[in-house]
Image: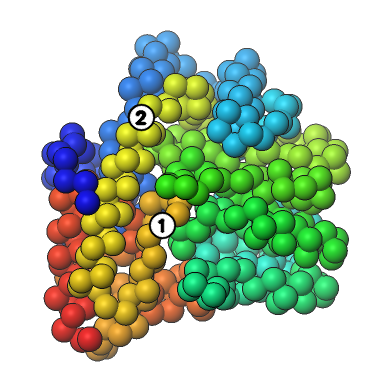
């Protein structure tokens, strides 16, 4: 386990409360691990870019040359990091991945058609989908031969043969931390293509991949995958910019390009000028900072590996292949009259985590914990959980 001191270690809960994010103010008096953002300072190239924008008072509507610059930076970034060749004109700007998802549901599929969501899933893929008038078909992930979760492709195929048109793919996966292999993506592409379906690929965590794992953009798996999918990416997770509101929708289908072309201004209208400026800096100059953060996160995963083995029996914890999100089976905890393990631990341990039930039926009794926090805070959070966990095992 990496025990070397790092500047991030000096960040305290008091510092983070003073920063004033929703994560650190929603449940006062608790240690939060429920919002997928990092508690680390921004990369210097990003703060410098934002400082320049501040000096220039660049807070008006997004200038077209700046938008074009981000499209070019995005195309260059995915080429360098994922060997994905796209043209800048294939990139549409958006406020965030959920706004991009809403555009897809409103413009590219049949109104009211069911949406297939492998579960557990990022919570808004369940709530936003239904709010927009599309029933959700939850397809629970299966345990693979080695216990590694995998998609239930036969069930997905059955639903695509019915009224469902769209599969939501989250890669790297939130909350399971999976980084899908080429053969897994290829198998999904075959199922979707055979049914004439579509994939919305959420790849917002793509820069956050660890060890020997490699992010493979779904659209690169085959020509068919490129034509039946649309991809959402962003610098927001990897460089900690969610509040600046900027993501990119990569359109690789000729048909989708034709359908979205008349709406390009509306689609891009939600991207903020500071968010675009910050994203350009991240993609072009944020690499060294990101590598340092990934190394630090790997040290946090070392802590989690050891702690889960020794203090959280039966948790089913798996070290994330990607993202900074971890997932625990907490059904062995006696939660008494509490509605969920998350409610129980918030009241009795002073820890605020995500209730797994919000991630779908398959997540009931589970917990989602965000590990992107200073290591001393992570260790204190885990130590607060352990007595309650062990007591009931």
Rendered image coloring scheme = rainbow
Q: What residue is disc 2 on? A: 289
User: Element type at marker 2?
Assistant: helix
In terms of secondary structure, where does tag 1 sit? loop
User: Within 10 Å of the Cα at label 1, are there few (<14), some (14-19), or many (20+) other Cα atoms?
Assistant: many
Image point 57% across, 61% down: which residue? 125
- Residue 56 in the image, given as x and y percentages of width and height: 42, 11
Write the residue at 65% across / 39% down. 249
For disc 2, the neighbor class at 10 Å (few under 14, some 14 to 19, many from 20) is some
Toward the top, the furthest residue is 56
Of residue 244 and residue 231, the one placed in the foreground of this image is 231
Residue 27 in percent (x, y) is at 24, 60
Pointer 2 with pointer 1, Cβ within 8 A: no
Q: Is residue 110 visible?
A: no
254 sits to left or right of 91: right
Indicate the position of residue 284 as horizontal and vertical percent values. 50, 22
Q: Distance between the residues labelled 2 and 1?
A: 20 Å
Between 9 and 299, the one lying in front of the other is 299
Image point 50% across, 27% down: which residue? Answer: 283
Task: Specify whether residue 389 is in view.
Answer: yes
Answer left or right for 2 relative to 260. Answer: left
Residue 142: which quarter of the image?
bottom right
Earlier-in-chain disc, 2 versus 1: 2
Q: In this view, does 157 lie above or below 64?
A: below
Q: Which mark is residue 320?
A: 1
Rendering quarter of residue 269: top right
| Badge number at residue 196 | none
Q: 171 left or right of 183?
A: left
Looking at the image, residue 193 sits to the left or right of residue 231; the answer is right
């Amino acid at each position: 386990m990496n025990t070397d001191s790092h500047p991030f270690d000096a960040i305290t809960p008091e510092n983070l409360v003073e920063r004033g994010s929703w994560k650190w103010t929603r449940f006062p008096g608790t240690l939060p691990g429920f919002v997928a953002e990092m508690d680390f300072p921004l990369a210097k190239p990003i703060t410098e870019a934002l400082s320049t924008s501040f000096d220039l008072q660049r807070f008006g509507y997004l200038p077209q040359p700046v938008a074009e610059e981000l499209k070019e930076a995005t195309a260059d970034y995915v080429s360098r990091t994922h060997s994905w060749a796209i043209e800048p004109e294939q990139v549409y700007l958006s406020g965030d991945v959920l706004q991009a998802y809403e555009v897809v549901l409103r413009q590219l599929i049949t109104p009211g058609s069911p949406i297939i969501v492998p579960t557990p899933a990022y919570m808004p893929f369940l709530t936003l989908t239904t709010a927009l008038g599309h029933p959700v078909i939850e397809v629970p992930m299966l345990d693979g031969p080695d216990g590694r979760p995998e998609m239930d492709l036969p069930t997905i195929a059955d639903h695509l043969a019915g009224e469902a048109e769209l599969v939501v793919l989250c890669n790297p996966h939130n909350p399971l931390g999976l980084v899908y292999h080429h053969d897994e993506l290829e198998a999904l592409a075959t199922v979707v293509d055979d049914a004439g379906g579509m994939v919305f690929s959420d790849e917002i965590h793509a820069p956050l991949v660890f060890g020997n794992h490699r992010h493979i953009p779904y659209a690169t798996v085959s020509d068919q995958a490129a034509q039946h999918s649309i991809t959402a990416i962003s610098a927001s997770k990897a460089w900690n910019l969610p509040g600046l509101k900027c993501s990119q929708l990569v359109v690789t289908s000729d048909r989708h390009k034709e359908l979205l072309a008349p709406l390009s201004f509306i689609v891009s209208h939600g991207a903020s000028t500071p968010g675009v400026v910050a994203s350009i800096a991240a993609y072009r100059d944020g690499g060294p900072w990101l590598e340092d953060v990934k190394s630090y996160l790997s040290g946090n995963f070392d802590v989690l590996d050891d702690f889960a083995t020794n203090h959280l029996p039966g948790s089913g914890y798996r070290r994330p292949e990607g993202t900074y999100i971890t997932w625990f089976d907490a059904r062995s905890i006696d939660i008494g009259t509490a509605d969920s393990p998350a409610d129980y631990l918030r009241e009795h341990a002073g820890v605020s985590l995500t209730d797994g039930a919000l991630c779908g039926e398959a997540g009931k009794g589970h917990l989602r914990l965000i590990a992107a926090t200073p290591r001393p805070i992570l260790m204190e959070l885990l130590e607060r959980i352990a007595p309650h966990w062990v007591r009931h095992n």
